[in-house]
Image (cartoon, rainbow, N blue to C red):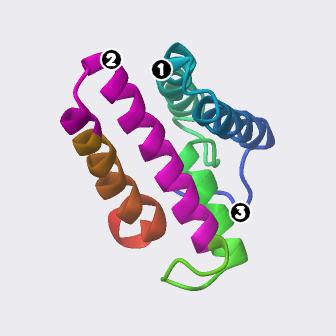
């Protein structure tokens, strides 16, 4: 897929709002349903971006917008500069997933494994998108 130089502004705002809700859910551990709802909201946003722009060349998904931002702000392969911010994003999303799984599955082991698998997936996907896309 050929990608435009800038992200779709509407989806950039939507993803920023989604991530703000990730932070909000992390700040409210007593409301696990909020965390679950935010995590599940990822799928309709991502699917709408794929469906809406299936034939067009735009940046509308979370990974393409973060990739664009990373390329515009840093040239480091290590988590320096914006890469450190991106590492924080990966870790917070994974933490919320692990905490939510722990709550609903009532298994700390499953929650920790879910969070670690999320990091293992997101880290190469977002930190080195040229290789792991």
- Horizontal side of 16 relative to 107 (left or right) equals right
Q: Main secondary structure of the magenta part?
A: helix
CA gap, disc 1 and disc 2? 9 Å
Using the rendered view, name the quadrant where residue 62 is placed.
top right
Which of the image's four quarters has the C terminus? bottom left
Q: Earlier in the sequence, mark 2 or mark 3?
A: 3
Q: Earlier in the sequence, mark 1 or mark 2?
A: 1
Task: Give the residue at mark 1.
Answer: 36
Badge 2 element: helix
Residue at 52 percent of width and 64 percent of height: 87
- Horizontal side of 3 relative to 5 (left or right) equals left
Q: Are marks 1 and 2 in contact (CB under 8 Å)?
A: yes
Residue 28 visible in the shown view: yes
Task: Give the residue at mark 3.
Answer: 5
CA gap, disc 2 and disc 3? 41 Å
Q: Is residue 42 above or below residue 114?
A: above
- Horizontal side of 59 relative to 87 (left or right) equals right
Residue 113 image offset from top left, x and y in percent: 22, 43
Q: Name the residue nearer the viewer: 52 or 83.
A: 83
Q: Earlier in the sequence, mark 1 or mark 3?
A: 3
Residue 120 image offset from top left, x and y in percent: 29, 57
- Closer to us: mark 1 or mark 3? 1
Task: Give the residue at mark 2.
Answer: 104
Residue at 44 percent of width and 44 percent of height: 95
Q: Is residue 62 magenta?
A: no
- Closer to us: mark 1 or mark 2? 2
Using the rendered view, name the quadrant where residue 66 is placed.
bottom right
Residue at 58 percent of width and 35 percent of height: 26
Region in magenta: 83-111
Badge 3 element: loop
Using the rendered view, name the quadrant where residue 130 is placed.
bottom left
């Amino acid at each position: 897929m050929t990608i435009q130089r800038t992200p779709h502004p509407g989806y950039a705002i939507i993803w920023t709002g989604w991530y703000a809700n990730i932070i909000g859910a992390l700040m409210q551990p007593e409301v696990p349903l909020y965390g679950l709802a935010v995590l599940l909201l990822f799928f309709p946003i991502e699917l709408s971006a794929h469906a809406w722009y299936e034939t067009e060349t735009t940046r509308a998904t979370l990974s393409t917008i973060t990739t664009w931002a990373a390329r515009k702000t840093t040239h480091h392969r290590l988590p320096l500069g914006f890469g450190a911010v991106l590492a924080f994003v990966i870790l917070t999303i994974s933490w919320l997933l692990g905490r939510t799984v722990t709550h609903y599955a009532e298994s700390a082991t499953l929650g920790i494994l879910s969070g670690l698998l999320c990091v293992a997936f997101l880290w190469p996907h977002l930190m080195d998108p040229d290789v792991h896309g």
